[in-house]
Amino acid sequence: DAGVIQSPRHEVTEMGQEVTLRCKPISGHNSLFWYRQTMMRGLELLIYFNNNVPIDDSGMPEDRFSAKMPNASFSTLKIQPSEPRDSAVYFCASTRDLLSPLHFGNGTRLTVT
Amino acid sequence: SQKIEQNSEALNIQEGKTATLTCNYTNYSPAYLQWYRQDPGRGPVFLLLIRENEKEKRKERLKVTFDTTLKQSLFHITASQPADSATYLCAPPLGGSYIPTFGRGTSLIVHP
């Protein structure tokens, strides 16, 4: 089991550019979560999917953020246009069901200059 | 509003001592709480889950308690080692009407 795989590990981009973060959940896991972590706010849930369907996106900060899960093995988080305040570490996590623990990827560190 | 809070100050202890970390919740009655460990540059890793009807749960040197009267969970590491140094996060249940935010966690530093 390779675990949750995120790419890229690091992303540096200029303000105004589009950023796409990618996640491959653990095979057989039905729920997928996107989190953002900063020193000030900790680990915040942005959106989660159950069986590829977005269940709650109330944590998505603005319309500049969007997430998709076209199939059970792939999800993307897109920021367009990016801003310096979006700089953070973005984590993807998956779980078999909502009664089971989360398995996190190692995150994407995003820096927007 | 519903909150789950941990002490944001770092906890410094000597090797061999017991570390105790606190997780408090308000305006909320979680069916269970989870504890995760996070090392720098890595994602959180699940350690223990304790349900509201369980008073205590153990795993090797780790012990978690759940006090629904105090609305508090305590996380203990006995015979602590420098390798236990990390940030420890308390997390509410997934899904449902409450969308979990882990919060900032508590940094534990074990000195040799």
Image: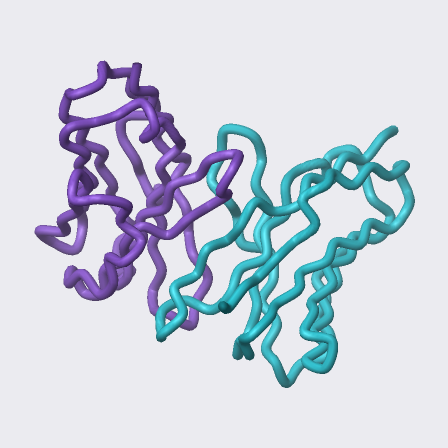
Chain colours: A purple, B cyan
**Left or right: A35 as drawn, with respect to B92:** left
Whether residue A1 is visible, yes or no, is: no
Where does residue A1 sit, x and y in percent of width and height?
A: 36, 47
Residue at the bottom extreme? B53
Residue A19 image point, x, y percent: 18, 27
Provide residue B30's location: percent of width, then percent of height: 53, 76
Where is A83 relative to A66, above or below? above
Residue B12 visible (yes or no): yes
Spot occupied by residue B45 in the image (x, y as percentages of width and height)? 52, 48
Count the marks. Answer: 0
| Foreground residue among A62 and B104 | A62
Q: Is residue B2 above or below residue A109?
A: below
Residue at (72, 36) in percent of width and height: B85
Q: Residue at point 28% right, 61% down? A: A31
Quick one: which residue is furthest to the left in this view?
A70
Position of the C terminus of chain B by quadrant: top right
Residue at left offset 59%, top offset 57%: B90
Please name whichever residue, B66 or B48, is drawn nearer the observer in this view of the structure: B66
Q: Residue at x 51, y 45 (%)?
A: B44
Residue farthest front in this picture: B1
Quadrant of residue B25 in the image? bottom right
Question: Left or right of B10: which side holds A47?
Answer: left
Please say if B60 is above or below B12: below
Q: Quadrant of residue B59?
A: bottom right
